[in-house]
Image: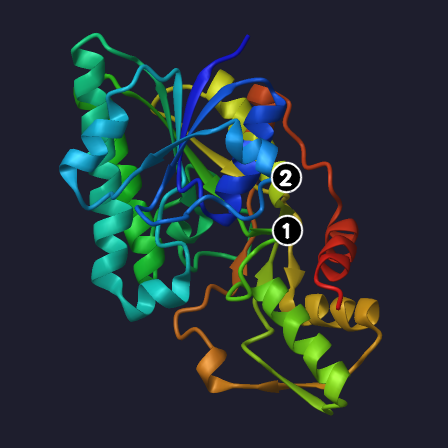
Amino acid sequence: MARRIFVTGADGFVGSWMIRRLLDDGHDVYGAVRPAPDARPPMLTTEEAQAVRWLPLELGDDDSVRRVADLPYDAVVHLAAVASGAQAKREPATAWLVNAVGTARLAQALADARAAGRADPVFLVVSTAEVYGRGNAVARRETDPVAPCSPYGASKAAAEIAALEAWRRTGVRVVIARAFPHTGPGQDPRFVMPALIERLRFAKRIGAPVVKVGNLEPVREFLHVRDVVDAYARLLSRGEPGEVYNVARGEGVPLEEVFRLLCDRIGYHPIPELDPDLVRPADIPHLVGDASKLSGLTGWRPRVSFTDLVAEMVHAQAD
């Protein structure tokens, strides 16, 4: 059955993949983009872009939020955010205004539309595993303490609090998805895997003996973005209001091992050299999640293996 689904941050990396998934499922898709002459996602085909109803959205403008929130959606996927930890560190106030205040503003607008009888959408708020902070070297569960140690993680934790408060107060059907690290073709090279691939390819091209890297000691898991949007699609149908769900593979890999695997795939093995400018002072040593709650509810499992993900990323960024 086709549903009317509104996606904020539709001009972003995950937003593009989310829109494609929803169109493939036969839904009517509304995509919110930043006000700009041409903010439609370049990752979408012309046919896909034409199938979406595009709406301008500025999360810092109450009137803009209310205009887009007042339509009769069945579900809202809230992806719009300052998503880069590095950017949030440089501009913490902006991260809080977009991630926390923007989410609170959208939640209230949806609650008002619900109270007026215009719509009662599921409101899927996409958060991050970084809300857990450092913690212990075990797979994180939704019941673990939230103790963010970065402006990005803190602003997303605040977004969760704002949305869940709106649910308790107004009944707007909020579902929280805490996504663990994910990547895929089209991701910005500010993020770790595409950044490493870009540097390794450049080093190979010029014959450089070393490659600048950040801290390679942390343990991370990596999901394919296709599996992540599959989890979001399932939560739109089956997520329980007021609940939080990890979206995670549950298998951690040291970044040093990721670097080695990328070297093997690219066919070049330079020496990794630590660059202090690439090191995050509040880096989380171990960030791996337990998604048994999501799996038990929806049957979701990641379909793309980590090995296949690495191969696809290297192929996608081939010269």
The residue that disc 2 covers is 226
Residue visible at 24% across and 46% down in the picture: 100
277 left or right of 318 in image: left
The answer, for residue 292, to whether it is visible in the render is: no
Residue visible at 48% across and 41% down in the picture: 15
Q: x, y percentage for residue 43?
A: 58, 46
Q: x, y percentage for residue 269?
A: 79, 81
Quarter occupied by residue 168: top left
Indicate the quadrant containing the N terminus: top left, top right, bottom left or bottom right. top right
The answer, for residue 186, to whether it is visible in the render is: yes
Indicate the quadrant containing the C terminus: top left, top right, bottom left or bottom right. bottom right
Residue visible at 52% across and 44% down in the picture: 14
Residue type beneath disc 1: Gly
The residue that disc 1 covers is 184
Question: Residue 229, relative to residue 116: is it above or below?
Answer: below
Residue visible at 25% across and 63% down in the picture: 92
Question: Decide: marks 1, 2 in contact (CB < 8 A)?
Answer: yes
Q: x, y percentage for residue 247?
A: 54, 38
Question: Residue 160, relative to residue 201: is it above or below?
Answer: above
Viewer-closest of 24 and 104: 24
Q: x, y percentage for residue 250?
A: 63, 45
Quarter occupied by residue 57: top left
Residue type beneath disc 2: Arg
Q: Secondary structure at mark 2?
A: helix
Distance CA(mark 1)–CA(mark 2): 8 Å
The color scheme shown is rainbow
Q: Which mark is residue 247?
A: none
How many other residues sit within 10 Å of disc 1, few (<14), some (14-19) or many (≥20)? many
